Amino acid sequence: MALPSRLLPVATAGALVLTLAACGGGDEPDATPGGDTTEGSGTTGEPAAGGAEEGDGTLTLYSGRNEELVQPVLDAFTEETGIEVEVRYGDTAAMAAQILEEGDNSPAEVFLAQDAGALGAVSREGRLVALPQETLDLVPETYRSVDGDWVGLTGRSRVLVYNKDAVSEEELPQTVEELTGPEWTGRLGIAPTNASFQSFVTALRVLEGDDAAQTWLADLAANDPQIREKNGMIVADVDAGAIDAGLVNHYYLYELAEEQGVAPEELTAALHFFGAGDAGALVNISGIGLVDEQADGDAQALVDYLLSEAGQTYFVEETFEYPMIEGVGTPADLPPLEELETPEIDLNDLDDLQRTIEMITEAGLL
Amino acid sequence: MALIPLAYLLFRTAQGGLGAWVEAVATERTARLATTSLLLAGVVTAACLVIGVASAWLVTRSNTPGRRAFAVLLALPLAVPSYVAAFTWVSVADLWTATPGTRFEGFVAAAVVLTLYTYPYVYLPVAAALVRADPAQEEVARSLGRGPLHTVLTVTLPQVRPAVVGGGLLAALYVLADFGAVSILRLDTFTRAIFTAFSAGFNRQGALTLATLLVLVTTVILLLEGRTRRAGARFSGTHVTRPARAADLGVWRWAGAAGLGAVLLAALGVPALSLARWMARGTSAGDATGRLWDAAVGSLTASLLGALLTILLALPLGILAARHPGRLSQALERTAYLAHSLPGVVVGLSLVFFGVTVALPFYQTTWLLALAYATLFLPLGVGAVASAASQAPRSLEEAAAALGRSPAQVFRRVTLPLTLPGIGAGAALVFLTAMKELPATLLLRPTGMDTLATRLWSATAIGRYAEAAPYALVLVALAAVPTWLIVRRTGILPAAGEREPLRPVEVEDPTGASDLLEGVKA
């Protein structure tokens, strides 16, 4: 090994790092030309003091969900409570890795994640604190952590998006099993790198067993699927007629309609829900958890607000997602969550993504 | 600085133990990833060398029409982030494929896109070196009866060999570290596997294990490159006093122009077409106007600071490498390249770790972000400084020292002024590359700060392509400024035309060093 000869540069650089860090201490960060241009106060590294009840009037949120979808409801929260929210937007998975890497020094007080998997990963390493029982009770058991340290905020259903001109009503499948048949050869779009697809395959494994899931993946791969990087691209391609149908989350259709400036029903693409408790009808969540000791009353206030009628109504009306609490209605003209024939699955059972990814890779889809 | 990610990787992998490492690494998948990554790097580098060297020669040494405009435009693809490039190529694929649903993806697609946006790494240094290379040797070769093509291949190219090899190395490392293009074009490479391990499995350990392997691969490439570098003698003279004559290509000069035009059309035309279509189709473009300013300011400050810090760190390394070539200085210079092949997310995470454990007051400030840029792009700075320092005649320093100046004075009065243009070009290159950086920026930017790259990411993530287009345009426009600066500073100006009289080369010399130069020659 070339290890010994590499140690010298390592040591040299280590010394350099320390020297520079020491030198850097001289000029204070307020001299940063860019540090304060967009933010009034640079309170990022500030350790949040105070007990569980006392808030300090600001909180730091790590959001794995897009600014476009989240910022308006956060602004409403600030308006309502006077608590300022400093938001860090990023990719859900990278953010989970970041929170774990930051450890005890994490500035994050709240983690808003795109999917249950990321919350589970942070929770497993003990970085989330338990939520009060009355918060947990707002959300159906299926859509919250068994350990009580995260809850779902919104539900997203897996659907088949299809082109109304290319697929007739009779053709629409009841199960994902049918999609591997010859009548669907080359017509189906999937996004195997996407966490939502992977969660769905995990659900398939939990419901039908690994062997059946493996067979389904192999059959799907053999059926010439149209592979895309993102759900949104599938919906756009289905609407444009490039592919006939695709497995996606339900709200992408509404995003497309908004970007094109038309009503959802004017699109050529339409949604179809799978039935009979099929894995294709899985409802996953975006969720929220409080990070470590930093969580104070402000953080809890945000969770409370997002699970209140106002917060939930925002998601229903603006992001077209399913509410987690009762009595808020449903997005657009979609059937209510209770009427969906969702599979009997606890989201907590969907944490074995590792094996799922191996299986998708083995099938040649990744 | 460059070693922070390496130390971090070593630390994290050591936590898993050697056994776990071997087990994770010695798989068929790893072998396949290695093959794909290396093959891609090889093909793209070869293509970059061909395009880069040919275009550099056409622009600096021939009478190809429009050379002056080409000289600048040919460097511009560097300003296009690879994820934007790949995305725009994919979204115009429907224009030329007859069967709907056919995708522009896979190995060939990735190779084409990566080549079109990395060849400037070869083009720029080679063009600069060609301008400075001593034409006397070529003239001797021609007068001794060698044909023009033969002369170019056997005399001119060996003269600029360090620039060719250096540029090729940067291109190869860029390809190894690239994630944007390969993920969008669906090619399974190391970086994509690293990202997938992070994003899908939340498998930090697995991701970092793969990253260590990438470091090993890079080490091998660096060792090989070091070997060819030693084998290649530098036989350029020290003082160039006049530019080379432009070769008359006859009617072929139109073919040359057409070739350069085709490269530009592919590299710049496709994104332009795509962006125009996004703007026309979508409705969200208006949302960009309010955010554009903040994002541009964010991009500029972070990248400028990053460029300054990088050059500050690169200065000692580059001058050491050029002035005191030896095992130690070479080893130091090489290590700067190691982190360059690591994907941004790994460098980002390593600095998150460094930030929270060592430099907490700086965590999530622009400073740490600038440090990340310095870590990622140090080789660009070191390369520029080293080549500038090696082209500045050493005899001047010796003369100054002989005249009783202290080493510090020599450095300040002679070395620094002579290398300044090269350093400026290096800083511009780092600046422009930093503006495009995304994964490390997302992890390390101050909370609430936006850059054009993060805005672009945010908009495309939820399909707001019309909003994304203005960010992409401004990003490319802003990056075009340093690109232009690089072209000017490296002195890539077309050689004198055949009818123009030969005239002395205009060395930009704000310092009066030329007086000294005259003295030395006399």
Image (cartoon, rainbow, N blue to C red):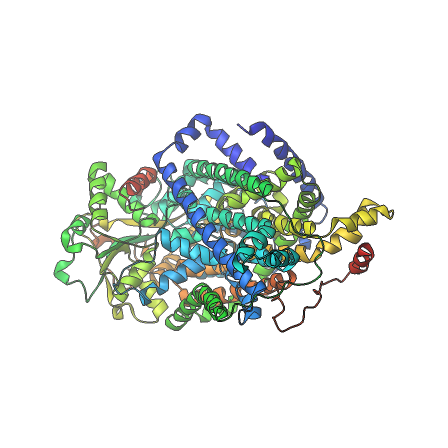
Q: Is residue B410 left or right of residue B232?
A: right
Q: Is residue B285 left or right of residue B418?
A: left
How far across and how far down the image is residue B114, in percent? 44, 55
Residue beneath the point at 31% across and 71% down: A262
Residue beneath the point at 22% across and 43% down: A218
In which quarter of the view is residue B243 placed?
bottom right
Using the image, determine if residue A29 lies above or below residue B18: below
> Which residue of the protein is positioned furthest toward the right in this rendering?
B404
Using the image, determine if residue B19 lies above or below residue B9: above
Q: Nearer the viewer, residue A150 or B194?
A: B194
> Which residue of the protein is positioned furthest toward the front in this rendering?
B145
How far across and how far down the image is residue A59, in percent? 52, 51
Q: Nearer the viewer, residue B177 or A70?
A: B177
How far across and how far down the image is residue B467, in percent? 44, 66
Q: Nearer the viewer, residue B258 or A255?
A: B258
> Which residue of the protein is positioned furthest toward the top in this rendering?
B19
Specify whether residue A345 is in view.
no
How far across and how far down the image is residue B295, in percent? 54, 62
Q: Is residue B493 left or right of residue B118?
A: right
Residue beneath the point at 61% across and 70% down: B497
Using the image, determine if residue B237 lies above or below residue B261: above
Q: Is residue A48 left or right of residue B17?
A: right
- Number of disc labels: 0
Specify whether residue B154 is in view.
yes
